Amino acid sequence: MKNKVFLDVSGREEFLDNDVPGSINIPHYMIMDNLEKIPTDSEILVYCNSGRRSNIISKVLEKLGYNVKDIKTASAAKILMQGKEGSTEPLDEHDLTST
């Protein structure tokens, strides 16, 4: 299984407010100048506050060859990181629709 990297494409202050431990922050408007910071051998889980910027950046990264999933929001990122009720297995995107 590939490593998962949580990428917050919100602005810096939003990133600090989102408080998703272990995620990296590259604001959406700085992505193209910081591609070297995004691992090419991992699954990139992209999010922001509303899902709008993550949707756009996910499409850009996918066209550049990255393995990307748009998980939309910081809330979704927190749920994925926590896993299912005490389980060590992380949730997948299908589990988010039932919460």
Image: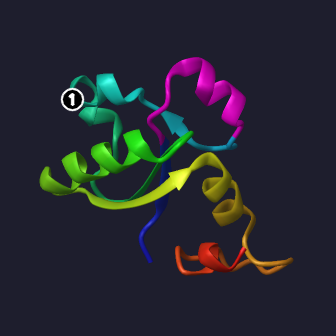
Q: Is residue 74 left or right of residue 8?
A: right
Q: Picture coordinates of residue 54 (x, y %)?
A: 40, 45
Q: Picture coordinates of residue 96 (x, y %)?
A: 62, 72
Q: Amino acid at mark 1?
A: Met
Location of the N terminus by quadrant is bottom left
- Residue 84 in which image quadrant: bottom right
Point out the residue furthest to the right here.
Answer: 86
Residue stretch rendered in magenta on the structure: 8-19
Q: Picture coordinates of residue 65 (x, y %)?
A: 16, 57
Work out whether 67 lies above or below 60: below
| Residue at 47 percent of width and 47 percent of height | 51
**Which residue is nearer to you in this view: 33 or 53?**
53
Work out whether 93 lies above or below 24: below
**Which residue is nearer to you in this view: 77 or 72?**
72
Location of the C terminus by quadrant is bottom right
Q: Is residue 71 left or right of residue 90?
A: left
Q: Is residue 4 left or right of residue 84?
A: left
* Callout 1 secondary element: helix
Q: Which residue is mark 1?
A: 32
